């Protein structure tokens, strides 16, 4: 729509400064939902057309299952289409010998029974992908305004409460410096910060911020994890707790994360501190535990 004028406001000094900057930047197409399958497959196909611009690496996913969890997952796995979703089911014996994985189980981690190997999965640079979209957006005539945080949404009625027949609408939005912006339409794509903006005017966004922990660990030697560090290593999902590992072996690093639920409160923290797991030994972090159980040695 060449006649439409669009202004994009971002509270950060540069794009991709919010959740995107903290993203693990992994992608996959292994979903039981038809909607998610369509969205992921079309996105991954598009990533392939700009792979060199976004540092895309189609390394694959190794989704490891314990025996009990494998049985529970059968209904979802049956919804995958082997031709379209491009995956294989591996036994423990079929795991590539290059990977030094401890598959026998230990402590809280159950033994590996099967592996769902997604071929059309991998990693990319979330920041480079965002910068690509910004470049395309500005080419089409879009305008970008950084360091602009919306603090207040002004409605067409000044009263705190008003009857529904008044035809209330957003009159303007106001930033941290008191500057007003008016438009025919407003789109709030503000992620975890959406409730702060919309609940005061009576809109329930059904978005709840929650901390997800992601740590980067330095390997003394990449051969601790694989026999050949120059080979492509898939992203790993362990058979317990949804713990996932993103190898970045060219830099001698691995990223480890998980999504804990019960006991992890919904709250907004722009810079959340790491959790202390007091039930572990004083010298041992939860990541030490994960790595000790994961690696063969």
Image (spheres, rainbow, N blue to C red):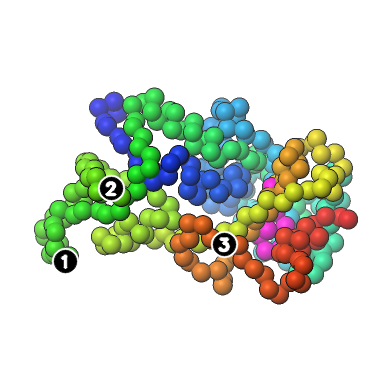
> Which residues fall within the magenta stretch?
237-246
Rendered residue at 18%/49% (across/down): 171
Q: Quadrant of residue 86?
A: top right
| Mark 2 in CB contact with mark 3 (< 8 angstroms) | no
Question: Residue 214: where, in percent of width, then height?
Answer: 62, 55
- Frontmost of labels 1 and 2 is 2
Instruction: Assess disc 1: are there few (<14), some (14-19) or many (≥20) residues with their C-alpha within 10 Å of its C-alpha.
Output: few
Question: Residue 294: where, in percent of width, then height?
Answer: 79, 57
Which of 119/279 is in front?
279
Give the alpha-carbon distance from disc 1 to disc 2, as whole Å. 26 Å
Which disc, if any, is residue 161?
Answer: 1
Which of 153/206 is in front?
153
> Which corner quadrant holds the C terminus?
bottom right
Q: Is residue 248 magenta?
A: no
| Mark 3 in CB contact with mark 1 (< 8 angstroms) | no
Visible residue check, residue 87 = no
Residue that label 2 marks: 177
Residue that label 3 marks: 273
Question: Residue 106: where, in percent of width, then height?
Answer: 82, 66
- SS for tag 2? loop
Give the alpha-carbon distance from disc 2 to disc 3, as whole Å. 29 Å
Tell whether 206 sits left or right of 262: left
Instruction: Report the magenta stretch's main SS.
Output: loop
């Amino acid at each position: 729509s060449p006649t439409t004028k669009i202004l994009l406001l971002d509270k950060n000094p540069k794009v991709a400064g919010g959740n995107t900057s903290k993203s693990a930047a992994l992608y996959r197409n292994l979903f039981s939902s038809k909607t998610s399958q369509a969205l992921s497959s079309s996105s991954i196909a598009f990533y392939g057309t700009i792979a060199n611009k976004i540092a895309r690496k189609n390394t694959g996913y190794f989704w490891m299952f314990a025996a009990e969890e494998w049985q529970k997952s059968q209904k979802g796995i049956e919804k995958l289409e082997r031709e379209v979703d491009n995956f294989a089911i591996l036994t423990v014996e079929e795991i590539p010998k290059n990977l030094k994985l401890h598959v026998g189980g230990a402590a809280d981690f159950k033994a590996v029974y099967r592996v769902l190997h997604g071929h059309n999965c991998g990693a990319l640079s979330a920041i480079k992908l965002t910068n690509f979209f910004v470049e395309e957006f500005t080419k089409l005539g879009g305008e970008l305004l950084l360091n602009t945080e919306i603090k207040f949404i002004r409605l067409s009625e000044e009263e705190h409460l008003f009857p529904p027949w008044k035809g209330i609408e957003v009159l303007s939005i106001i930033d941290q410096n008191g500057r007003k912006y008016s438009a025919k339409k407003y789109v709030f794509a503000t992620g975890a910060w959406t409730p702060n903006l919309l609940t005061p005017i009576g809109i329930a966004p059904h978005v709840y911020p929650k901390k997800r922990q992601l740590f980067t660990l330095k390997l003394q030697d990449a051969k601790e994890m694989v026999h050949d560090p120059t080979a492509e290593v898939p992203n790993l999902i362990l058979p317990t707790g949804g713990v996932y590992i993103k190898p970045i072996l060219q830099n001698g690093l691995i990223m480890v994360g998980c999504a804990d639920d019960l006991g992890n409160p919904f709250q907004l923290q722009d810079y959340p501190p790491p959790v202390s797991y007091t039930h572990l030994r004083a010298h041992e972090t939860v990541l030490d535990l994960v790595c000790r159980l994961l690696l063969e040695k």
